[in-house]
Amino acid sequence: MTDQSQAVNDGVPSEHTDIPTAARRRASKTKHPAARPPARDDIPNFDYLRSIIQRHLLLLAPTARTRPQRVHSAIRYSLLAPGKRIRPMLSMLTAYGAGRFDTAAMDAGCAVELVHTASLVLDDLPSMDDAEYRRGQLCAHRRFGESTAILSSIAMLNRAFGLLSSIEGVDYRTRNRLVTALAGVVGSAGLVAGQERDLNERNADLNLSEVDSLNRLKTGVLFVASVQFGGLVAGLDDEDLGRLQAFGELFGLAFQTADDIVDVQGALSTAGKDVKQDGAKPTVVALAGVDTARRRAGEQLQEAREVLADCSFDTAPLAALVADFERRSLR
Ligand code: IPE
Ligand code: IPE
Ligand code: MG
Ligand code: MG
Ligand code: MG
């Protein structure tokens, strides 16, 4: 099996590592302890999946030798750093369950990972969450400066659209649907709206269902895109795509809640990013406390599983990922 930390180091020069290497290795081990074998032996091993996603991102990333070198270095720095890759995994596992496991599914998932990474670079800026660390290293703006970080984010966003529009092995209608869907996901009715509300609405002004709707925009949209893009590439019909929307929203809500619990209970050494930053943020944890937040997230995952049971394709690979996430992040 490929060692993920090795693949990661291929793309990120060691001088970019700002948390001591040993701590970083420990952090990545804590996040990805040896995967238990999935219940069914025909489901792709998750460590293997992460390693092939990492290799694909390496192929998609611009070389740091071509101009503008600084922006390209910043893209490689953020994109190839050790993220959990849950979004491309969702795309690949959806497509796999629907009968397709190839470069087209990988491109679709990596387009979402590009958008996600771009959103993290912006999320960390001083004018937004003002973070110091991300993915076990200094944030892009602290390593390269704000202007380069912003430009690298714009470049990653555009790379994602370019990738979807030229995806091979799918017809032009499907490509068109992917590009149109991504435009909706990123825009002011999606991620941008969620981030704007996250920054400018205090938790005291919101109730739980309003926080859920904010989290659906901020985080859910990319989870929905991840599974739907895998489904679109694999040719699923609109009914299944609708069920995947519900599944992605529920998983996204539970995921954001788990992330908000990490902010309260986690540490930089294991999370690889700043913690104890969300005190005034509109989160489920701030509103309802850790215990209620954890219970709600468990219920959302249970609902997500029920949605999967209604799908007409094989959803066992997705269900295995839900179980893996729940075991690592909510117990
Ligand atoms: C962080 O996402 C932002 C949230 C939506 C909570 P991830 O936890 O997936 O971050 P990486 O990709 O592993 O760095
Ligand atoms: C960010 O949520 C979600 C995005 C759209 C980037 P957070 O602000 O909680 O993510 P982290 O904790 O910085 O990763
Ligand atoms: Mg934020
Ligand atoms: Mg943040
Ligand atoms: Mg967070």
Image: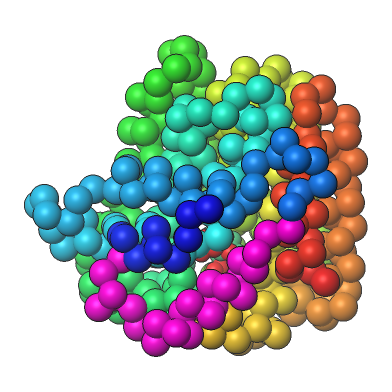
On the image, the x and y values in percent for residue 245 come to 71, 37
Q: As displayed, is residue 286 above or below residue 184? A: below
Q: Determine if the magenta segment contains residue 85.
A: no
Depth check, front residue: 248 or 8: 8
Q: Quadrant of residue 275?
A: bottom right
Q: As displayed, is residue 318 above or below residue 200? A: above
Depth check, front residue: 61 or 265: 61
Q: Residue at x 45, y 30 (%)?
A: 103
Magenta span of residues: 12-36
On the image, the x and y values in percent for residue 268 come to 54, 85
Q: Colour scheme of this structure image?
A: rainbow
Q: Residue at x 44, y 17 (%)?
A: 169
On the image, the x and y values in percent for residue 94 come to 66, 34
Q: As displayed, is residue 175 above or below residue 272? A: above
Q: Residue at x 85, y 38 (%)?
A: 307
On the image, the x and y values in percent for residue 144 come to 23, 72
All told, the count of numbered labels is 0
Q: Residue at x 51, y 28 (%)?
A: 102
